[in-house]
Amino acid sequence: MRKIEYDLPKKILDQSKERYFDKETGHSIAIMKTVFCGKIKEIMVAYIVEEDCAKLLTIHPLKDGQKENRIKTGRWRKI
């Protein structure tokens, strides 16, 4: 089990200034730097919006270079 604080997904969805659209999955992505397991990490939340309600799909820390690679390949488009 990941050691993710209960309120972290909502915090990222509410406060993230970095948003992308994932062309491969059709999901929205929010990314924010935060303390995770004692280190500052970029955490991503994948979600969809249905009837004015955001539904969380997954949350996890990004690996080194993962965000840059997805942007470079065109998979993630900034919104």
Image (cartoon, grey):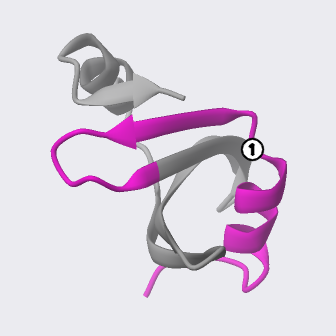
Q: Which residue sits at x=26%, y=20%?
A: 69
Q: Is residue 12 magenta?
A: yes
Q: Which residue sits at x=35%, y=56%?
A: 27
Residue 44: x and y in percent read 52, 51
In which quadrant will I find the N terminus? bottom left
39 or 44, which lies in front?
44
Relative to 55, is 46 above or below?
A: above
Q: Which residue is mark 1?
A: 16
Residue 70: x and y in percent read 27, 27
Count the marks: how many?
Answer: 1
Relative to 77, is 9 above or below?
A: below
Q: Which residue sits at x=34%, y=23%?
A: 65
Amino acid type at mark 1: Ser
50 or 74, which lies in front?
50
Residue 8 falls in which quadrant of the image?
A: bottom right
Q: Secondary structure at mark 1?
A: loop
40 or 70, which lies in front?
70
Residue 48: x and y in percent read 45, 67
Q: Residue furthest top?
A: 72
Residue 10: x and y in percent read 75, 71
- Residue 32 appears left or right of 59: right
Q: Which residue sits at x=33%, y=19%?
A: 71
- Count neighbours of disc 1 (C-alpha within 10 A) and say few if under 14, some if 14 to 19, many if 20 or more: some
Magenta residues (range): 1-28
- Residue 34 appears left or right of 20: right
